[in-house]
Image (spheres, rainbow, N blue to C red):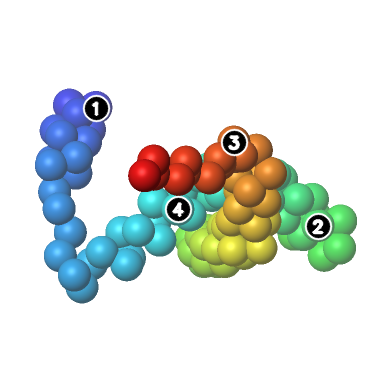
Amino acid sequence: MALYPALILVAARYEPGARLLPICSWLGVASYAAYVLHVPLHSLGGVVAQLSAGVWLERYAPVSGLAFIIVIGLCAWAADKYWDRPIRAFLNQKLAPARKPAPAPAS
């Protein structure tokens, strides 16, 4: 708990270089989708494993946890690419105020 504020401070002041920028950008975009999806996907995965194979995923830790992280990453990427970005673009287009043409200069 004591190191978390310091970690946030360092991360807020850090400017990634050209090599790390795409990774940092993707992590920033995917973080919201991962936040939204992790509980429903964890519950769904547990129920499916329990009902289909009678398996508790916790028995296979940490392998099941690593697999879950990969699944969350892929789902977050897909949610951003095929859901969030298209909907944001559509709403921005539809809700943007109509632009009036610039008046012609007086002669």
| Picture residue at 13% right of the left edge, 48% below the top | 14
Is tag 1's residue or tag 3's residue first in the polypeptide sequence? 1
Q: CA distance from mark 2 to mark 1?
A: 35 Å
Q: CA distance from mark 4 to mark 3?
A: 26 Å
The image position of residue 10, as x and y in percent, is 13, 41
Is tag 3's residue or tag 2's residue first in the polypeptide sequence? 2
**CB contact under 8 Å: marks 2 and 1:** no
Relative to 99, say whether 78 is above or below: below
Task: Give residue 72's quadrant in the image.
Answer: bottom right
Relative to 87, say whether 106 is above or below: above
The residue type indicated by label 3 comes to Pro
Between marks 4 and 1 in the image, the one whose residue lies nearer the viewer: 4
Is tag 2's residue or tag 1's residue first in the polypeptide sequence? 1
Between marks 1 and 3 in the image, the one whose residue lies nearer the viewer: 3
Is tag 4's residue or tag 3's residue first in the polypeptide sequence? 4
The image position of residue 15, as x and y in percent, is 15, 53
Q: Residue furthest right?
A: 51
| Picture residue at 17% right of the left edge, 59% below the top | 16
The image position of residue 85, as x and y in percent, is 59, 56
Label 2 sits on residue: 48
Label 1 sits on residue: 1
Q: Which mark is residue 97?
A: 3
The image position of residue 62, as x and y in percent, is 48, 61
Q: Residue furthest bottom?
A: 19
The residue type indicated by label 4 comes to Val
Q: CA distance from mark 4 to mark 1?
A: 26 Å
Between marks 3 and 2 in the image, the one whose residue lies nearer the viewer: 3
Q: Which mark is residue 29?
A: 4
Relative depth, front residue between 7 and 82: 82
Relative depth, front residue between 100 and 41: 100
* Badge 1: residue crowd in 10 Å (few <14, some 14–19, many ≥20): few
